Image: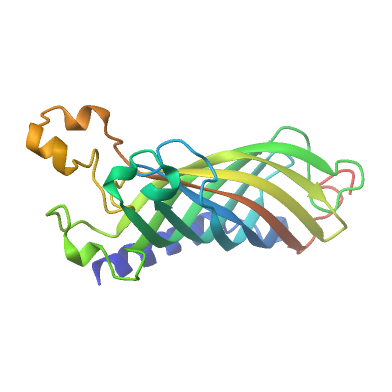
Amino acid sequence: MKNSKVLTAFLILALSLLMPKEANSQIMEVGATGGLSYYIGDINPSKHFNQSEIGFGASLRYYQNLRWAFRFQYSRLGLTSSDEVVAFRPERNLAFNSDVNDFALIAEFNFFNYWTGSKKERITPYIFAGVSLLSFNSTDLEGNALQPQKNEGVDYSTLSWSVPFGIGVKYSISKRLGATLEWRIHKTFTDYIDDIEGYYLDEPEMQRGNGNSHVFGYNNDWYGILGLTLSYRFNLPSRTVCHGM
């Protein structure tokens, strides 16, 4: 119940910030995204795109001008990893699957002037950053939920925050259609997407009494997506607002 209230409040705030103050300046796009999502954390500390899963989502983008845009992004990302495949510490034999629902508010900066529908300024690289609210439901490979098992003796929340950031390229296909190719990475504020906190002690280490276990641990989990978005522009601006259209 508490998680749903936080999520509702975040959605209301995000949508209110995207709404332009003047109706005649409303220049927006809706988009659909598909791509490959992956996890970085205690099981897979460094291999981007390792054991990639399907990720998809939808977005609402508001263009403030030719260089700045703001968007609300919903993403549903499949994440998985196993010691057997990654082989970072195969002796642990740990693995998990998770579906992450991510709700993000993102600011974008275009390196070149750009607007979907422009005949002169059809392409631009861009960078972006923002904040997101995420929920996850991690299971073992047999589909058993991991959070209720309290494997590490902690009753952790499956709701958390992240900082999404990355790079991309925008291309104007036609007067109303645009495409973006984007690599987005999320630095989360939870260490339990994989149901492991920090450095996991195996049986030989527990017998040795390893007192420096957390020195080599990984504080929080990360995830990313390489996605292609097709967007549709509506409520076209006047020529006095956007040049080169």
Q: In which quarter of the image is the N terminus?
A: bottom left
Nearer to me, 216 or 169: 216
- Coordinates of residue 235 in the picture (x, y in percent): 76, 64
Nearer to me, 118 or 181: 181
- Coordinates of residue 172 in the picture (x, y in percent): 83, 51
Q: Is residue 150 above or below residue 69?
A: below
Task: Report which quarter residue 178 is drawn in.
Answer: bottom right
Task: Report which quarter residue 10 is drawn in.
Answer: bottom left
Q: In this view, does 120 lie above or below 145?
A: above
- Coordinates of residue 74 in the picture (x, y in percent): 52, 61
**Left-right relation of 4 to 128:** left
Query: How many badges with numbers are in the image?
Result: 0
**Left-right relation of 177 to 136:** right
Nearer to me, 212 or 18: 212
- Coordinates of residue 230 in the picture (x, y in percent): 73, 60
Query: Residue placed at 82% from the left, 61% from the top?
Result: 176
**Left-right relation of 88 to 110:** left
Coloring scheme of the render? rainbow
Q: Is residue 116 above or below residue 121?
A: below
Nearer to me, 51 or 163: 51
Query: Residue placed at 35% from the left, 71% from the top?
Result: 143
**Left-right relation of 101 to 139:** right
